[in-house]
Amino acid sequence: METAELLPSRRLARWHLALPLLAVLVLLLSTSATQRLDFWLHDTFIRLMPVTPPDDLAIVAIDEKSLEALGRWPWPRHRHASLIDRLDEAGAGPIALDILFTEPSENGHDDRLLAEAMERHGNVILPLHIFPGDSDMPLREFLPTARLTRAAAALGHVHAELDDDGIARTLFRRQGLGEATWPSLADAVAMQAGIQRQAPAATEQAAPYVNVRSHRVHVPFTPTGAIPRFSYIDVLKGRVPDSRLAGRTLFVGHTAAGFGDVLPTPLSGRGNPLTGVEFHANTYAAMARNRLIQPVSLWPVAATGIGIILLITLAFPRMRPTRTLLLSVGLTALPLLLSALTMRWLQLWMPPSAPAVVAALAFPLWTAERLALLTHFLNRQLDALGHERNVPTSELADTAPARLLEHLKELLGARDGWLVTEGQAVRGQSPVTTHQFQQPGKWQHEATTSRVRFHRNGAWHELGLVWPASGTDDARRAYLDRLPLHAGSAHAVIKTSRERLSRRIQRVHAAALNLAGMRRFIGTGFERMPDGVIVTDALGVIEFVNGRVADWFGTPRESLQGMPLPRLLAGSVPHTTPPSGTRNWRDAVLSVLTGGTPLTAELSLGQRTLLFHLTPFGRSPWRQPGLIANFSDITDLRERQRQYREAIDFISHDMRSPLVSQLALLDQLQRENRHAAPETLGQIARLARRSYELAEEFVQLARAEDLTEKRFYECELLTIAENAVDAVQQQAQSREIRIELEGEEDLWLQGNAELLERAVINLLTNALQYSPESTEVAVTVEKAGGYGIVAVADQGPGIAPEDQPLVFQRFRRQQNQEMGAPHGAGLGLAFVQTVAERHGGTVDLVSTEGRGATFRLYLPLEP
C-alpha cells in the first residue's frame, strides 16, 4: 500500500534511475566500450540485407589459373594492352584496371602499347595509392606513370578502411594529400559508367603532406559468388564469348590466394577475405543500387538514448515489475530495430548498442533501486519503531531485578535491601541465611523486613527490603502484595533465523507488537489524564475525546465524536463567551485553523472553571492539520486567587484606613500639644507611617503581579521619569540631594504608566535613602537597540557583592544597612522587577562597594 510519505522518495527514485542511465549513456558514447557489439550488429544487418549486383558488372580475375598459364607476376604491360584490346573488341564498358603502374616498365615500348590500348578503348580507369615512400618519409601520392595517367579516362584511390577489429566495412569516397582530390575507384568507375555525374565534392583542405579524407560510407556486400567472374587467361585467349563481355563494367585485379591485397569483410570474415578488386566491385554494386550507407553523427544516437531514458523514467514508476521487464526488453530491441530500418530504407547507420545497453540496464537498475528504496523504508520504519521503544511501555516483568530493588527502595523509603540470584548475593546481604518461602512471587512480611522469591529470565531471585526500626505501614505492604514479579519457571525459546529476510520479518513482527502495546499505553494515558483532551480534523469536527471531557460536559463520548467543536463550546458550556476579538466560537476556532495562533480562554461549566487551550495539531506532513484542545480544571486555583484578592482588599482598606485616621489624630494632637509629649507623638507618627508604607508596598506589589496587557496603553518614557522625579523632589530637598535628569524624548512604549512611574519612584527613593546628604542622584533616559533604559545612579555606600543577587527578592534588605538607614519591607525592588517583567523587560544592578549603585530598567519600545 502506497502512502504519501513514500512520494518524495519515489520522485527522488526517478532521478536516481535517470541519472545513472544518463551517466552510462554518456560513458558508452564517449568511449569504445560498445564498439565490438556495434560491429557485430552492423555485420549481422549487412548479412541479412545483401545487395543484388547489377547485371552489367563482372570481375576479370588474375587467378591461379592465369598465373599458371602466363607465368609469375608481374606480367609485361603489353599483355594488359592485349587484354584491353580483347575487351574493346568484345564491346566491354568501363574497365577498372586495379593494378598499380607507378613506375615505368623496363621496356618503354610496353608502356606505349598499354597507353595506346587504353586510348583506343577510351574508358579505362586506373588506381592510385597514398602511402609513405619509406618508413621515415611523409605520405606521397603514387599515381600511374605520366603516359598512362594521360591515357586513363579517370583515376581513383583504392584505400579501404579497417576498423579496430581488422574488418573492412567502410571507405572514404574522397581522399588526397592536402585536399580530398581523388574519388574512390568505385566512384570513378560509376562516373564513367554514367551511374552518377560526379563524386561528392571535396570540402576540406590541409597541408600538402596531410592525408585528407571525406565522405565516409559503409559498404553493403553482395552474396559470395553473386558477381560474375572471368579468368584473365580465358578472356585473353578468347574463351569467353563476346556476348558475355559486351556492355559490362569490368573490374580487373588479383584474386589468387596469397597474392595481392586481401580484406576481411562482414560477409567473409578473416577466414575467407575478399581481395581488393572484389571489395571495390562490391562498392560499385552498392553504388549502382543506391545502397551505400551513410554513418550518422553522435547526436541522433544520443537523442535516441535520452528519449529511451525519459520514457523509462516516466513509465517505470507507474508500472508493475512484470510490465517494466517487458518494457525494458522492448526498449532494448527498439534501437536495434530502428538501426536496421534506417540501414535498410534510409541507408543510414546508427550504432544501436549504447541506447540498447542503457535500456537493458534499466530493469535491473530499477529493480535494485526499488529494493534499495524498500530496504531503506523498512529500515527507517524499524529504526523509528526502535526509537519508540524508549517510551516506557514495558511490563514490570521486563525490569531487571537489581534495578527493581533500587526502585523499590527509593519509592518505599526502605533503609536497605538485598538481592540473591541462584544462591549468589548480588546486592546487600540477607539477614537470614536460609528461609522457607511458602509460594513463589508472594511477599512475606516480618517486623522490619519484607522478602519475596520469584523466577525470571531462567533464574531464581530472592529480593528483600529492610525497613526502619519502627517497621512499615500496611499501605506499603499492600502495595508489595499487588506487584506481579513471578514470571514462571518455564519460558518459550524463540529461535532467530539466520536468513536476512526472515530476521527482518521477525523484527517487523516484534515492532508491530511493540507498537500495539504503545498504542494501548498512550490510549490508557489519555484516558487517565487529569485534563480533558479533544482532537479535531481540519474541519473542526471532533475525532478523539477522552473520558474526562465526557464526564465534565455530561455528554456520552459517542455523541461527542463527530460533533463540530464550535457547537460543543457554544451550546454545551453555560455562561461562556468567546474570547475577545471574536464574535462567536465559530470565528475563534476558524482563526486558530487559518492563522495557526493558539487560543486560550476560560470556560464556566456549572460550578467548575476550565482553562481552555486550543492549538493547531499537525498530525502528518500529507494531511491537513487539525486542532487539539486541552481543558484544565482551575477551579481551586481561581478560588485561591479569589482569597488572595480578598486579602489584598482587606489590607488596602481595613488596614490602611485606621492607620490614616491614626495619623490624622496624632497630627492634631501634635498641633494642639495636649496630654502627650512631642517626642512621643513623633515616634507614634513614625511607626504609623511605617505601617502605612508597608501596606502600600504590599498593595503595589500585588497590583504589579496582577498586571496584564489589557491594562497597557501608549506612554512616553521620559515623561514617566520626569513625573517620578517630581514626586520625590521634596524628599530630596529635605536632605539637600540634587536630582539630575537627562534623557531622550519620544521613546514610546505600550505599558502601564502608573506602575512604571511607581517603579522609577522606588528606585529614586532607595537612592535618596542610601545617599549621603549634599550629594547627587543621576537619572538618565536613553535608547539601546529596541529598548528604552531608565538608569538611576547614586553616590551612596554601594552594595556588597554577596548581597547583590538578593536585592530583588521579597523582604530582603542590605544587611550592612539594617541599622544605618530607614527600614523598609524589602518589597520595593521586588516591585520594580515584577513591573519590568510584566512589560517584557528586565532590571539590573551595577555597584561597587563604597562607590554607589546604578539600577537600570530596560523596557521594550514600540517599533
Image: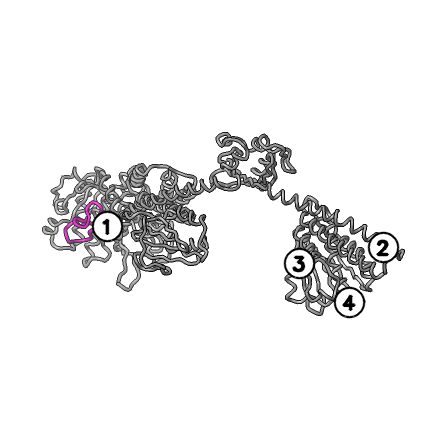
Is residue 465 at all visible to an observer of this figure? yes
Q: Which of the two labelled residues, at mark 2 and mark 4, occupies the earlier sequence position?
A: 2
Q: Which of the two labelled residues, at mark 1 and mark 4, occupies the earlier sequence position?
A: 1
Q: Residues within 10 Å of mark 2 (few under 14, many from 20)?
A: some
Determine which residue is flagged by label 3.
808
Q: CA distance from mark 1 to mark 3?
A: 100 Å
Assess whether mark 3 and mark 1 are in contact (beta carbons under 8 angstroms).
no
Q: CA distance from mark 3 to mark 4?
A: 23 Å
* Span shown in magenta: 252-276
Q: Secondary structure at mark 4?
A: loop
Q: Which of the two labelled residues, at mark 1 and mark 3, occupies the earlier sequence position?
A: 1
Q: CA distance from mark 3 to mark 2?
A: 35 Å
Assess whether mark 4 and mark 3 are in contact (beta carbons under 8 angstroms).
no
The residue at the point 59 percent across, 35 percent down is 605
Q: Secondary structure at mark 3?
A: loop
Q: CA distance from mark 2 to mark 4?
A: 29 Å
Q: Residues within 10 Å of mark 4 (few under 14, many from 20)?
A: some
Q: CA distance from mark 1 to mark 2?
A: 132 Å
Residue furthest left as drawn: 69
Assess whether mark 4 and mark 1 are in contact (beta carbons under 8 angstroms).
no
Determine which residue is flagged by label 4.
772
Q: Is residue 254 magenta?
A: yes
The residue at the point 76 percent across, 57 percent down is 690
Give x and y (percent) for residue 185. 26, 48
Q: Secondary structure at mark 2?
A: helix
Determine which residue is flagged by label 2.
667
Determine which residue is flagged by label 1.
167
Q: Amino acid at mark 4?
A: Pro
Mark nearer the viewer, 1 or 3: 3
Decide which of 787, 123 is in the foreground and name it.
Answer: 787
Q: On the rendered structure, is 209 left or right of 127? A: right
The quarter of the image holding the N terminus is top left
